[in-house]
Image (cartoon, rainbow, N blue to C red):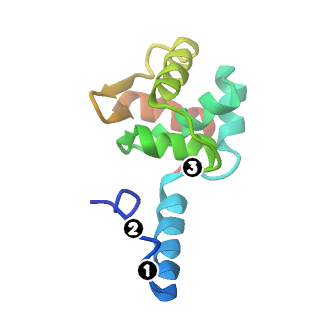
Amino acid sequence: MTAIARKFDIDRASPDAMARRIEELEYVLDTLLPPEGYELRLRDAFGLTPQQAIVVACLANGRNWSFEALIGAVTRWNQHIENKQIAVLVCHARKKLPSCIEIINLYGFGYRMSAEGLAHVRAMIGWQP
């Protein structure tokens, strides 16, 4: 189980355990989320909305993304949106992306980007993960 998906009982946790959990989550966010500024490059390159650009930038890191992780990335953990709203963002982003950039649905889990799509997006925005 990844650090982001692990359950954490905040009511029973000691201050040290809470501090370690915060460090774990910050590490996960730093390694999963794309570097600052890449969303703007995607918006300019493909005409995406800010939220669509965040989703595509996340998928461009080559990992499988759960709905929950994408929700956290899009909202920066500040609000709650439903899985269906992520599906709508992906649907609209797919229409704006060239056919060589394929976003693959992982049934019941989330999304990932095809290898060819990864190479194309990274080349377009100059991302070297």
Instruction: Name the residue located 50 percent from the left edge and 31 percent from the top edge.
Output: 82
Name the secondary structure under disc 3.
loop
Contact? badges 1 and 2 (CB < 8 Å): yes
Mark 1 Cα shell of 10 Å, populated few (<14), some (14-19), many (≥20): few
Q: Earlier in the sequence, mark 3 or mark 1?
A: 1
- Tell me the number on the disc at residue 8: 2
Residue 108 coordinates in the image, percent (x, y)? 28, 31
Q: CA distance from mark 3 to mark 1?
A: 30 Å
Name the secondary structure under disc 2.
loop
Residue in front for this viewpoint, 56 or 116: 56
The amino acid type, in three-letter code, at marker 3 is Pro
Residue 23 coordinates in the image, percent (x, y)? 51, 75
Count numbered badges in the picture. 3
- For label 3, the residue is 34
Instruction: Name the residue located 55 percent from the left edge and 35 percent from the top edge.
Output: 81
- For label 1, the residue is 13
Q: CA distance from mark 1 to mark 2?
A: 8 Å
Q: Can you tell which of label 2 and label 3 is closer to the viewer?
A: 2
Q: Earlier in the sequence, mark 2 or mark 3?
A: 2
Name the secondary structure under disc 1.
loop
Residue in front for this viewpoint, 32 or 62: 32
Q: Is residue 120 visible?
A: yes
Is 116 placed left or right of 90 in the picture?
A: left
Mark 2 Cα shell of 10 Å, populated few (<14), some (14-19), many (≥20): few
